[in-house]
Amino acid sequence: MRVQCVLCNTVENIDDYSPLAKRLRNRPIHTYMCKKCEERITERTNERKATGNFRTYEEKKDEDEWLI
């Protein structure tokens, strides 16, 4: 299966029967990112986390008193 990276527009071939190929075929909202771009984003995200100014906005979960 031929796929194109969302960021750098390089075209690569992946195995037709891999889980990634199935996910891309069945769910068009999922996009493909090549390993080089994925590593670059991971690196820069970790650098930003190390500065202390990076925040992840997570959903606050209320504890249900009936489940305790």
Image: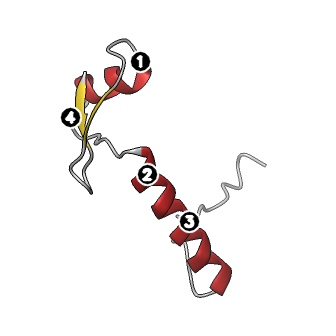
| Residue 14, percent from left and from top | 34, 24
Earlier in the chain: of badge 1 and badge 3, it is: 1
- Between the residue at mark 2 and the residue at mark 1, the CA separation in whole angstroms equals 19 Å
Question: Which marked residue is nearer to the observer: mark 1 or mark 4?
Answer: 1
* Residue placed under numbered mark 1 in the picture: 18
On screen, 59 above or below 31? Answer: below
Q: Secondary structure at mark 4?
A: loop
Q: Secondary structure at mark 2?
A: helix
Does 4 sit left or right of 47 as displayed? left
Which numbered dot is residue 59? Answer: none
* Residue placed under numbered mark 4 in the picture: 28
| Residue 51, percent from left and from top | 64, 86
* Residue placed under numbered mark 3 in the picture: 43
Number of other residues with Cα within 10 Å of mark 4, as a class: few under 14, some 14 to 19, many 20 or more:
few
On screen, 15 above or below 62? Answer: above
Earlier in the chain: of badge 2 and badge 1, it is: 1
Earlier in the chain: of badge 3 and badge 2, it is: 2
- Between the residue at mark 2 and the residue at mark 4, the CA separation in whole angstroms equals 22 Å
**Total numbered labels:** 4
Which numbered dot is residue 36? Answer: 2
- Between the residue at mark 1 and the residue at mark 4, the CA separation in whole angstroms equals 16 Å
